[in-house]
Amino acid sequence: MPEQDPVRDDLAAALAARRELGPDYEDAVLESFLARLDAAVATRVDARVAERTIARAADRGAEIRQLVLGIASLIFGIPVTAIATSNAEGIGALAVSWGGIAAVNAAHAWTVRRNR
């Protein structure tokens, strides 16, 4: 069953009213139809603007989380570097530590981009 189109239904009703009422009421019927059409267009535009606003807010939130994660990684990376280089195998431990930090940041960035 095809989906009903409110604008098509309003137009059909306006044409039927015009036929029934005659040419004397043509302007009133037309104004009424245009008012309903304007309201329908405004509703659709408002819905699209709301969707885009929500999407932009979500994108902005993801950007902020990515920035916070990057800053936190640098802050926590300093003691990790000190601890990792205090051992005899300092370079290997340092590489593994920073590799893990980089992997967490990359995984978060990849998840954010995939969800857009």
Image (spheres, rainbow, N blue to C red):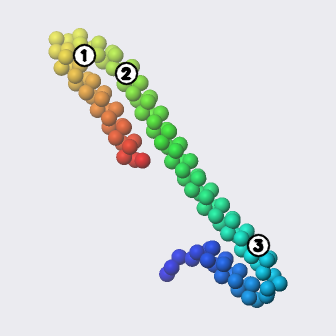
Q: Amino acid at mark 2?
A: Leu
Q: Residue 5: horizontal and vertical position, in percent?
A: 58, 75
Q: Earlier in the sequence, mark 3 or mark 1?
A: 3
Of labels 3 and 2, the one closer to you: 3
Q: Which residue is disc 3 drawn over?
A: 31
Residue at left offset 62%, top offset 56%: 46
Residue at left offset 27%, top offset 14%: 83
Q: Label 3 vs label 1: CA separation?
A: 77 Å
Of labels 2 and 1, the one closer to you: 2
Crowd rating for badge 1 (residues with CA inside 10 Å; few <14, some 14–19, many 20+): many
SS at mark 1?
helix
Q: Which residue is disc 1 drawn over?
A: 84
Where is 20 relative to 35, above or below? below
Crowd rating for badge 3 (residues with CA inside 10 Å; few <14, some 14–19, many 20+): few
Where is 2 relative to 73, above or below? below
Q: Which residue is disc 2 drawn over?
A: 74
Q: Residue 76: horizontal and vertical position, in percent?
A: 36, 20
Q: Label 3 vs label 2: CA separation?
A: 64 Å
Foreground residue among 26 and 7:
26
